């Protein structure tokens, strides 16, 4: 029996979306393949609120995160971390030999405009990475606070990890001046894992042209050239099945309506937050709570694996903590095609089994 997933990726995928992956293969150098990738790019531009080019990568989101920091840092990267995924972006820079400094916030806190200003005003950096939605802590940075500071430094390439928020949270890439906005399929987009997607500005492309060692598979310039000149092809063989599913799912997202989709995520977050405040406590700064995943401070010390064991009888699965706060928190994802009704049912089920666990 399939367990309904309330974990922050991979998420449940609707049967009609999965079915798209059973379509017959086409040659990846055909006009049909270009049309498919071009169609995805047009729809992704809408969802990212950008006019910039869209790149696909047959990898999870990490591939393009690594590609961005390596391809577009000519001098030094300022990597801002509010948890596990920011820390990983720093490791990606270091392990690729990219000069980088790490700027950490206390866990549960966002990146502040003051921190960004202090770093960029040194003039040492030509690329900045920001985690939009830190899945480990359930904290979402407020890009409205950070973008105006970054905009004062036009030489800095502005990269954002929106892997666990894009499609569930409105991010207007162009208005915010985001040069590279990265996401992947298995979170708010509601698809199986295996594809990463990013927008890329002309500024980021120009930068990559100045960076000598960009690698190859995750070289953003190589991906960009195939999009521009072929057009809309991919340097190697892409995950065509996932591309069919993505193209179809983006139509569904547009049918639901982007604003409606963001509002549904916000509503689900409110339901989980209210529940968590009554039964446990919320982890982190209450002014920066994520609208796609909630991190719950396990103040009553319930065993999360025992809880998941009980929930398994109802075919539900939630998520333990992640990273340094693994043992003191657990997480409930409310993303992709999950409905407020399903969230309410999950929480009612947890309420039902909790007394048995505390006993
Ligand atoms: C899941 C996640 C990643 C990693 O994405 P993959 O697609 O698993 O490589 C990066 N950043 C955040 C915030 C995430 O939630």
Image: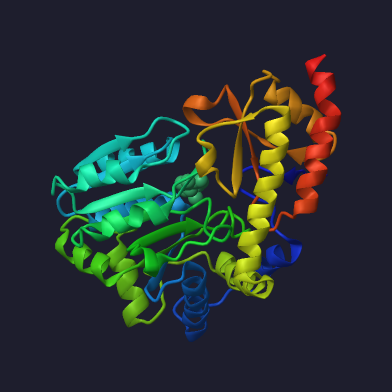
Mark yes or no: residue 36 visible: yes
Mark yes or no: residue 336 visible: no
Q: Nearer the viewer, residue 122 or 163?
A: 122
Compared across the picture, whether 200 is left or right of 243 comes to left
- The x and y percentages for residue 274 are 70, 39
Q: Nearer the viewer, residue 305 or 275?
A: 275
Compared across the picture, whether 271 is left or right of 47 comes to right
- The x and y percentages for residue 196 are 47, 59
The answer to whether residue 189 is above or below residue 272 is below
The answer to whether residue 60 is above or below residue 105 is below
Residue located 47% across and 57% down the image: 183
Question: Can you say which quadrant of the picture contains the C terminus?
Answer: top right
- The x and y percentages for residue 261 are 64, 63
The answer to whether residue 149 is above or below residue 308 is below
Compared across the picture, whether 293 is left or right of 353 comes to left
Compared across the picture, whether 13 is left or right of 232 comes to right
- The x and y percentages for residue 181 are 40, 60
Question: Among all residues in the image, which is located at the extreme bottom?
Answer: 31
């Amino acid at each position: 029996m399939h367990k309904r997933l309330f974990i922050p990726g991979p998420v449940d995928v609707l049967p009609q979306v999965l079915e798209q992956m059973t379509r017959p293969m086409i040659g990846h150098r055909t006009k049909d393949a270009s049309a498919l990738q071009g169609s995805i790019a047009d729809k992704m531009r809408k969802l990212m609120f950008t006019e910039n080019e869209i790149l696909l990568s047959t990898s999870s989101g990490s591939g393009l995160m690594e590609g961005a920091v390596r391809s577009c840092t000519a001098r030094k990267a300022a990597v801002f971390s509010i948890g596990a995924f920011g820390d990983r972006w720093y490791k990606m820079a270091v392990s690729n030999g990219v000069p980088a400094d790490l700027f950490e916030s206390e866990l549960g806190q966002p990146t502040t405009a003051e921190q960004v200003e202090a770093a960029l005003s040194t003039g040492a950096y030509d690329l900045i990475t920001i985690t939009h939605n830190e899945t480990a802590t359930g904290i979402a940075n407020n890009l409205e606070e950070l973008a105006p500071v970054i905009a004062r430094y036009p030489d800095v390439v502005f990269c954002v990890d929106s892997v666990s928020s894009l499609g569930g949270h409105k991010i207007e890439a162009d208005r915010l001046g985001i040069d590279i906005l990265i996401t992947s399929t298995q979170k708010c987009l509601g698809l199986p894992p295996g594809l990463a997607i990013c927008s890329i500005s002309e500024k980021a492309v120009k930068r990559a042209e100045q960076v000598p060692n960009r690698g190859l598979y995750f070289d953003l310039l190589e991906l960009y050239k195939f999009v521009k000149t072929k057009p809309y092809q991919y340097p190697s063989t892409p995950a065509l099945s996932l591309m069919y599913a993505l193209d179809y799912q983006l139509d569904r997202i547009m049918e639901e309506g982007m604003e409606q989709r963001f509002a549904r995520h916000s509503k689900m977050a409110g339901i989980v937050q209210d529940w968590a405040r009554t039964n446990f406590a919320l982890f982190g700064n209450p002014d920066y709570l994520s609208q796609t995943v909630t991190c719950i401070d396990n103040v009553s010390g319930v065993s999360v694996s025992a809880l998941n064991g009980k929930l398994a009888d109802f075919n539900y699965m939630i998520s333990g903590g992640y990273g340094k706060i693994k043992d003191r928190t657990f997480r409930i994802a409310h993303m992709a095609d999950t409905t407020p009704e399903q969230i309410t049912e999950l929480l009612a089920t947890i309420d039902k089994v909790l007394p048995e666990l505390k006993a």
